[in-house]
Image (spheres, rainbow, N blue to C red):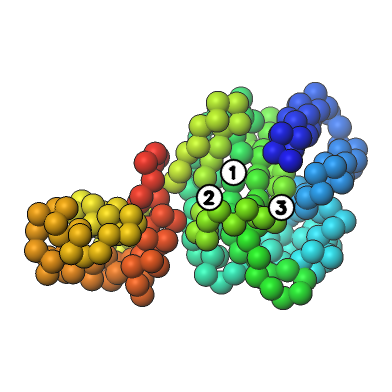
Amino acid sequence: MAVSYNKLWKLLIDKNMKKKELSIEQKKADWLKLSELAHSIVLVFDCCTKKFVFASDNIPQSYGIDPERLFINGHEPVLEIIHPGDIHYGLLVRKKIYSLLSSLSAEEKMKHKMVHEMRVKNVRGEYIRIIEQEQAIELDKSGNIWLMLSVIDVDASHESEITKSHLYNFETGEQIFIDLSDTLEEPLTNRELCVLQLMKQGLLSKEIANSLNVSINTINTHRQNILLKLKANNSIEAVNIAQRLGLLNSSIQ
């Protein structure tokens, strides 16, 4: 699936680059073909009008969204099916990713795609995990992103329960994770980040204390501060929130 999908993606981007003079109506056949061959939901968003200009036929049966609402109301129908717990993070990280992508040269914009993992409500009212991949397929005369292609698939791997996003260079394979730590009301100290890393490894307070050569009371204080600053109810939730914010990524931009 991954190999054939990447080939389809590259073919579509190459065709769009060669057929810039074609109208949106003339390009819809290619977008429909991508949806049929990849068995994915395909959307195309016009960044100038802030509305969708294409939605594959399978979106109503999968998520109960009327394509006409996408053409008129833009992202509003999409936000209605995203899990409430994923909306705030999703908006924050997309804003940063779009800002980073917009700062790239025209050539580099076309080499990157955004990868988002989130929970959405399907037509049966059940929340499922999906992977959305977004790619600029056309720029305007000033080099700004005009048309954005979005391909959505159900995440069948269930490798992670964490909602996250990153920027991916599909030529070099580089993954750029986004640092959202500046969105915290009070940042974590270096020692709290160190404790958080050990919490991620599953260490108990006593084990963390031994590892850092401090008292268990000190570690418990750090843990309480971490929960307060991340507005988490427990250690697992704190680690998940920290990963969303990019606090625990080995590669942070």
Give the position of the C terminus as an image quadrant. Answer: top left
**Image marks 1 and 2: residues in contact by CB distance under 8 Å:** yes
Residue 212 on image: x %, y %: 14, 53
- Pointer 1: residues within 10 angstroms few (<14), some, or many (20+)? many
The residue where tag 3 is placed is: 153
User: Which of pointers 1 and 2 lies earlier in the amino acid sequence?
Assistant: 1
Position of 137 with respect to 184 (left or right) is: right
On the question of residue 217 being in view, the answer is: yes
Q: Nearer the viewer, mark 2 or mark 3?
A: 3
> Which labelled disc corresponds to residue 165?
2
Looking at the rendered structure, the kind of residue marked 3 is Asp
Residue placed at 15% from the left, 60% from the top? 209
Question: What number is the disc on residue 208?
Answer: none
Give x and y (percent) for residue 184. Answer: 33, 61
Task: Name the amino acid type tagged 2.
Answer: Ser
The residue singled out by tag 1 in the image is: 114
The one of 18 and 231 positioned closer to us in this rendering: 231
Query: Real-space Cα distance between discs 2 and 3?
Result: 15 Å
Q: Are marks 3 and 1 in contact (CB under 8 Å)?
A: no
Q: Is label 2 in contact with label 3 (beta carbons under 8 Å)?
A: no
